[in-house]
Image (cartoon, rainbow, N blue to C red):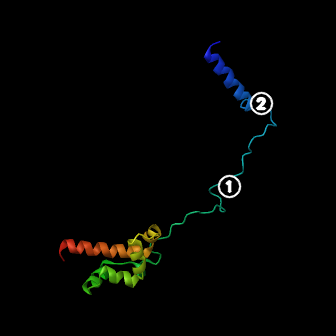
Amino acid sequence: MRLSYVLVVIAATFLLASEAFSTTADSVQGKISDVASPDSPTQRLLRTHHAAYEDGEERALTLKKMKRMRKEGKTKEDYAAKLKITDEVNRIAAGGVGMVQFMNSHKYDKYKTYINFLIDMKRKGK
């Protein structure tokens, strides 16, 4: 007998033993569960995205404010202290955890905006 015939017989035996070709209706099969429609109002949101600045005008860091802060001599460290994030910035700079959460905060956005403003002003020589 050739090897290919032996392999076909072995494969057929495994298929019959595993009920791959089962035609009976009472075989043990998984049932399809009812899944809620994604448009359903009861659908849970697993992730939320917060609006960057809900009350934008009060919390936004405008160019006018940044120029005034720079004119007053406020450094990035001073601004971090005003935002009350100095400890968090130092902890993350030292290799602490929580960097992603911190970088998603509105305080970090304001801090980063002011740092970028200071860098741009230094490059322009103003």
Where residue 6 appears, x then y in whole percent? Answer: 65, 18
> Which SS class for mark 2?
loop
x 38%, y 72%: residue = 93
> How dense is the environment of label 1, judged by Cα within 10 Å: few (below 14), some, or many (20 and up)?
few
Q: Which amino acid, by three-letter code, is at mark 1?
A: Ala
For this rendering, which residue is in front, 96 or 30? 96
Q: Quadrant of residue 44?
A: bottom right
Q: Which residue is mark 1?
A: 36
Would you say residue 85 is visible in this rendering?
no
Would you say residue 117 is visible in this rendering?
yes
Q: Quadrant of the C terminus?
A: bottom left
> Which SS class for mark 1?
loop
- Which residue is the extreme one toward the right? 26
Q: Quadrant of the N terminus?
A: top right
Q: Residue 4 has which mark?
A: none
x 36%, y 76%: residue = 111
Where residue 39 appears, x then y in whole percent? Answer: 62, 57
Q: Quadrant of residue 36?
A: bottom right
- Which residue is the extreme one toward the bottom? 72
Q: Which residue is mark 2?
A: 23
